[in-house]
Image (cartoon, rainbow, N blue to C red):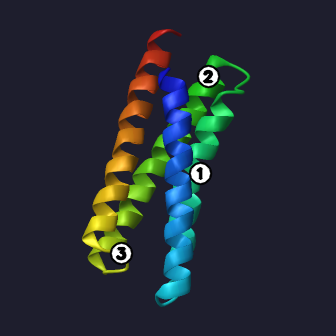
Amino acid sequence: MKQNLLVDLSKQFAVDIVNLYTEIKENRKSNVLLNQILRSGTSIGANIHEANYAASKADFINKFQIALKECYETDFWLGLFKDTRIITEDEYNDLFAKCSKIRKLLIASITTAKESV
């Protein structure tokens, strides 16, 4: 259940990041930092999805740990985008809440997986 929730949440978050990227590119001034948040924000879901096909428990944990690191990086970019007014406070709050939920689920899943090794 938690695994499917993570897949679903991370995929929707990636869609939100792609939409944000597209909206900023089209309607606001171009920003070289956009590629950073696009990469980290979509990598979360890609690594969670890839973990479903892990070759071992250690590989599974590693993929989730990479996804967690990408969550932290995305948090950084979101904060920077908010502080520099690239995104609004509302956009930040929405995306930060989604990213935080994914991060908490990843931490719980990693902890559980490590305990069962």
Residue at the disc numbered 3: 87
Check the image and report above or below for 54 versus 38: above
Left or right side of 87 for 27: right
- Mark 1, mark 2: which one is toward the viewer? 1
Q: Secondary structure at mark 1?
A: helix
Left or right side of 54 for 39: left
How far from the left and from the top, in percent, is residue 49?
Answer: 64, 36
Residue at the disc numbered 1: 43
Residue at the disc numbered 2: 58
Check the image and report above or below for 6 versus 15: above
Q: How many C-alpha atoms fall within 10 Å of the one at disc 1: few (<14), some, or many (≥20)?
A: many
Q: CA distance from mark 3 to mark 2?
A: 37 Å
Circle 2: residue type: Ala
Q: CA distance from mark 1 to mark 2?
A: 19 Å
Circle 3: residue type: Ile
Q: Residue 46's image quarter?
A: top right
